[in-house]
Amino acid sequence: MKTYPCPNNKRYNDYTSYSKKIFSQRVQKISLNAGFTCPNHDGTKGTGGCTYCNNNTFSPFYCKPSKSITQQLNEGINFFAKKYKTQKYLAYFQAYTNTYAPIEKLKKLYSEALSHPKVIGLVIATRPDCINEEILDYLQQLSQNNYIVIEYGIESTNNKTLELVNRCHTFEDTVLALKMTAERKIHIGAHLILGLPTENHDMIIGHAKKISKLPIETLKLHQLQIIKNTAIAKQFEQNPEFFFKFTPDDYINLVVDFLENLNPNIIIERFISESPLNMLISPRWDGLKNFEIINKIEKQLEKRNTWQGRLFNS
């Protein structure tokens, strides 16, 4: 029987296997909107936010900043409890930059979430330039008794791309933030967008090689989606030559190439994202669902007889 270097002996290091190993029961994330903003949105570093961003594409019905953290958690738990009777939950501070506030406000919000009897930890989505020693020291304390993940939006390892999409931080900021977090043994998640303007196949594979050298535990990937009423939608209309136009097969093969060059110890939490069709300009993949794309990726790995890390050079 063929063996692979991934810890689960599969062709890629999947999040489901990791979750079963870490937790003794099913664990579900509950998305939260705590009313944060971002430094490239409020004028501190820039205005307008990331050119591709529209938080309405991933906000559940219960996820409103007008509601308390406890209310959002209760409504989210009630929703998922209809499908799964016994499980615990992670409070997922998802919308905007969830460390971008004074430490006392963060302590209040995080403590409220962890005080819920069914919550066993936090997932905190943030930017690498919005973390500091004080916040990390506090999260290190919380991690002694709770499962704590900081999920960093890397998006690209290319500084020109980061500037083009108005991220207002550099890849060097990412490297520093991950180093500081790893020193405190806090779980680290990362997020990358494949197909940002002006990036080609080789540049995207370069992302895999660069992040493979970083202390990342889990990774979310997704295709660039052009959403209505965003700055990038206007750019897409005016300069379509800047964009890598994916068919489903193009994207599947790109992901397989990416996996081949990725450190096999990095856990893949997500391969694609699925925005509401009424908001989506491109790519429109004839209604293909996430699980269908994942199945196609797995079949392509088998067809090519390859696996995550096959070309990885430590």
Image (spheres, rainbow, N blue to C red):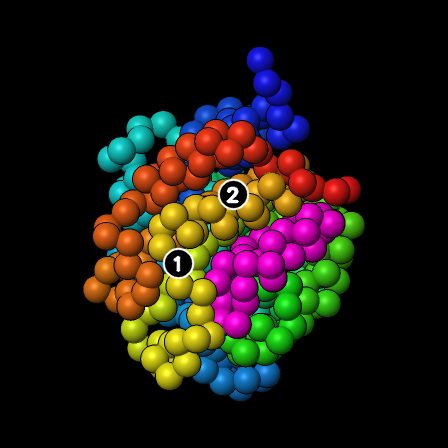
x%, y% of residue 193? 50, 60
The secondary element bearing badge 2 is classed as: helix
Give the magenta-colored segment's residue range.
190-217
Residue sitting nearer the eye, 198 or 129: 198
Viewer can see residue 159: yes
Task: Provide residue 145's location: percent of width, then percent of height.
Answer: 63, 38
Mark 2 belongs to which amino acid? Val
Classify 70 as above or below 295: below
274 or 311, which lies in front?
311
Could you classify mark 2 by the number of other residues whose Cα lies within 10 Å: few (under 14), some (14-19), or many (20 or more)? many
Which x, y percent locates residue 98?
Answer: 53, 63
State the residue at coordinates (50%, 50%).
254
From mark 1 to mark 2, how far is it between C-alphas? 14 Å
In this picture, residue 110 sits left or right of residue 80: right
> Where residue 212 sits in the image (x, y, percent)?
69, 48
- Name the residue carrying label 1: 246
Reading the image, the residue beneath label 2 is 256
Q: Quadrant of residue 58?
A: bottom left
Assign a secondary structure to mark 1: loop
Question: Going 38% across and 38% down the picture, which residue do you hit?
Answer: 296
Dot 1 or dot 2, earlier in sequence: 1
Mark 1 crowd level (few <14, some 14–19, many ≥20, 10 Å Cα): some
